[in-house]
Amino acid sequence: MALPALRGCCSRPPTLLSRVLRTEWGVISRLTNRNVAPVTLVPSMVRVFSANRDGRSNKQTQKVVVVGIPNPFIWFRTRIYYFLIRAYFDKEFNIEDFTDGAKQAFSHVSSLLSQCQFEALEGLVAKDLIGKLEEKCALLPAGHREALSAEPEEIMYTTPGDVGIYYDDSGRKFVSILMRFWYLTSAKLPDESLDGTRVFQVAIGGKGEAETKRLLTANYEFQREFTQGVQPDWTITKIEHSKLLD
């Protein structure tokens, strides 16, 4: 089983990110970009009001808005890598479609991790990484495991970070893209265990007690081998949840 995808032209039914890139073989040189693109986040609370018949405003909803401000130099450099991917690997590569697929993969895999369904990760996550994740998750308290899960509607911001194009000594060709995610969780976590995270009081519908949510971050690296004859599947080779699963 491979990661679900958005689109593709595989002979077998495509799965999560496999449809994102279509195979176009070419010649590459050794290129790497091993620095994660820094992003300045501006999280804020937005209150939405509605007017009653008497003209008075009534608060209805309250939500978190996260705005990302990427480093211009890193942004330009990653665009060069996207051009090289289109030129030598996949002429239909699109970072917007890739990001959408990566968000789906992140939500699905993080949910499996939270539920400790490690067998279900086979084919989605690199084999050597699954064993390490199982060991780390076994040591996490229940609240921390719950906080690993990111529902699609709770993912506030997503951005590409590290992009790599390289080959090994045997001539196998690889592309890797590190994706960074910011997401909200309502899991019960002790304040001292997640120092540095942002806490929000989110009121739903303007009634009842406000729900406390934390803004957490996660890094997932997606890798695909572009050697001719290899199945066009993306595999997650790195998983980090800041303050939870480093």
Image (tube, rainbow, N blue to C red):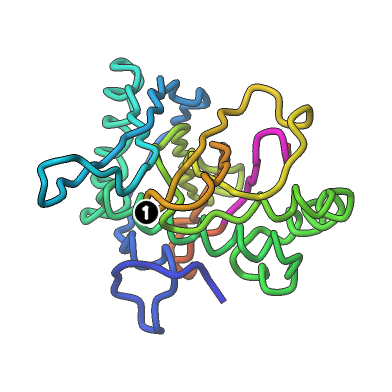
Instruction: Answer with left or right where residue 145 lies relative to residue 139.
Output: left
Instruction: Answer with left or right where residue 2 lies relative to residue 152.
Output: right
Picture quadrant where residue 125 is located: bottom right
Picture quadrant where residue 226 is located: bottom left
Give the quadrant of the C terminus.
top right
| Picture coordinates of residue 186, whole percent (x, y) | 60, 49
Give the quadrant of the N terminus.
bottom right
Identify the residue at image location x=44%, y=35%: 163
| Picture coordinates of residue 120, whole percent (x, y) | 67, 74
Question: From what the image shows, is residue 153 above or below residue 161?
Answer: below
Identify the residue at image location x=39%, y=83%: 13
Instruction: Answer with left or right where residue 23 lies relative to residue 217.
Output: left
Please tell me which residue lies in front, 167 or 138.
138
Q: Magenta segment: does it hold 202?
A: no
Please tell me which residue lies in front, 160 or 214.
214
Identify the residue at image location x=21%, y=56%: 92
| Residue that numbered label 1 is attached to | 205
10 Å crowding of disc 1: few (<14), some (14-19), many (20+): few
Q: Magenta segment: does it hold 240?
A: yes
| Circle 1 SS class | loop
Q: Residue furthest bottom?
A: 12
Report how many numbered discs are placed on residues in the image. Answer: 1
Magenta stretch: dominant SS?
Answer: strand
Please tell me which residue lies in front, 27 or 224.
224
| Picture coordinates of residue 239, whole percent (x, y) | 64, 46
Q: Amino acid at mark 1?
A: Gly
Residues shaded magenta: 236-245
Identify the residue at image location x=74%, y=73%: 119
Question: From what the image shows, is residue 95 above or below residue 226?
Answer: above
Please tell me which residue lies in front, 113 or 19.
113
Q: Residue furthest front?
A: 54
Question: From what the image shows, is residue 149 above or below residue 201?
Answer: below
